[in-house]
Amino acid sequence: MAEAQLPKGLSGAENLPQTKTELVNCFSVETPQGALVLPRPGISQNGVDFINWARGSFTWNGGLYTVFGTQLFKMDVEAGTATILGTIAGSSVIKAVAGFNDIVIMAKDTALYTLDKLDFLTDITTNQNFVSVTDVAHVDGHFIYIPTDGEPAFFSDVGAAGTVQPLSFFDAEELPDLNNTCFNFANTLVIGGTDSFELFRSIVTTAAVPFQRIKGARHRYGYIGALLEYTNSFLFLGREKGQDFGFYAIAPGSTEKISNPFVDEILAGYAPEELRDCVPGRIKWRGYDLATFTLARDSFGFYKGNWFKLNTLIDGFPKPWLGGYITQFNGVYYTASKRKFGKFEAINTDFGQRLAKSIDFGVKHPNNERFSCQSLEIGISQGFNDEVGTVGLFMSRDNRVYGPGLFKDLGAKGKYHDKLAWNPAGGLGNYDGFMGVRIYTTGDVSFAANSLYLNIR
């Protein structure tokens, strides 16, 4: 038998199908023994359904909060209940940024609020010198606001999110473009626009503006959406000026593109307005730090340079996963998703809906000659499942159309060393230089693959 390499993630291109590999609802990690494919977590429901759709969630002052529709809720995750605290106007996604005394809740381009430590909600939208804002950050006691029209940013007094002076506006555009985001990176203020990111240092000064531009620190990449703090960087969806869309990682000294042609090809099918609505998330699952991105028709996961697909089976068809707005609280990851609130667990469903895990890859003859595949064997974790689960093997001659599945039961609980092998009497077919392979399951099974062997003639 010859050993084949398990795919590390999404790669290749649609118009070159033999180059494509896919991991769906599972991701690849490197171990001393080689590549290991692990399943992503599922989501269990926590409490009853809400009337309206989720707009975001956050933690503050030891509590977990969500916004469904126009209502701000404080969650009791133990009881599975929620208490209404007030109204958040609009229907856009919310962003919450904590300060010393209160947290600012922004409904993008619509409204702005503060929530204090007594859970008192205050609308500051119409405060003196305020204008409509599209983003907010907090640095050294100041809240920094980005106006919806992309014009000069402005900042609050120290410790007073709702107080802005007439001279508290400053130009954040060394390279003229419209500002549309801001964030605090290691106490450096980063303001992003359609074509660049500018970096500012907070200084003690008698001047009206305490933020000084760091010369030579401009990044020539534009911001679209999906800002996510991740390890030692921030991830975002953007592009180089005049170029196609992609995912990037920005740190104070560099910006690096992290998406590959497989992902970029999917992004090219979206309008800029759709990309701005991309929902980012982050889950540390069993020690693995996963970033997630959900668009209207596609969802992705990202781990250590590799991408994988995320989806949920709705009425038997794969749809963008129900990951929603993810927040870590008291050591558990929770999500506000559509009309539901849930938590991530080691299960094979999202709010009761099945998820399908699959590994797609191709095998080529080194001389592009015809060959036959007699058998296939996969090293997969088993002996952990209370119920009998099945894994299907599907074969393809073009990596597009797959034949009927051959299904095998995983070993019963306690049978850890049984092999999962397909060895039918007539073999697995003849192929003209290329064989596509899909390993697939929707069962509630432990699915961790670490090796793959083929008997080819």
Image (cartoon, rainbow, N blue to C red):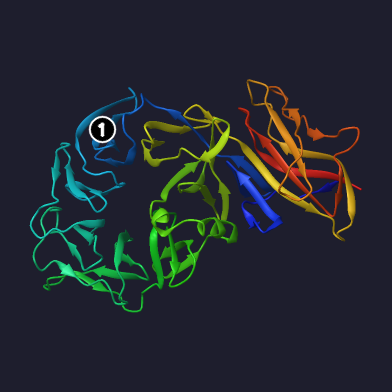
Instruction: State left or right for residue 282 relative to residue 169.
Output: right
Question: Which amino acid, by three-letter code, is at mark 1?
Answer: Lys
Residue 97 x, y percent position in the rendering: 26, 50
Residue located 60% across and 35% down the image: 356
Q: In which quarter of the image is residue 381?
A: top right
Left or right of 27 on screen, residue 271: left
Whether residue 24 is visible here, answered yes or no, is yes
Residue at 54 percent across and 40 percent down: it is: 311
Q: Is residue 417 above or below residue 93?
A: above
- x%, y% of residue 74? 26, 32
Residue 321 or 104: which is nearer the viewer?
321
Residue at disc 1, secondary structure: strand
The image quarter containing residue 382 is top right
Circle 1 crowding by C-alpha within 10 Å: few under 14, some 14–19, many from 20: many
Residue in front for this viewpoint, 209 or 175 = 175
Task: Return the x and y of residue 254 as percentages of the image width and height.
Answer: 44, 70
Residue at 86% from the left image edge and 42% from the top image edge: 429
- Decide if residue 437 is on the left or right side of residue 132: right
Question: In this figure, which residue is indicated by the disc labeled 1?
Answer: 74
- Give the percent coordinates (x, y) of residue 379: 74, 38
Name of the residue lying farthest toward the bottom = 216
Q: Is residue 450 above or below residue 419?
A: below
Camera-side residue: 456 or 368? 368
Number of numbered tags placed on the structure image: 1
In the rendered image, the quadrant that contains the N terminus is: top right
Residue 136 in sight from this viewpoint:
no
Query: Can you tell which quarter of the image residue 135 is in?
Result: bottom left
446 vs 153, left or right, is right
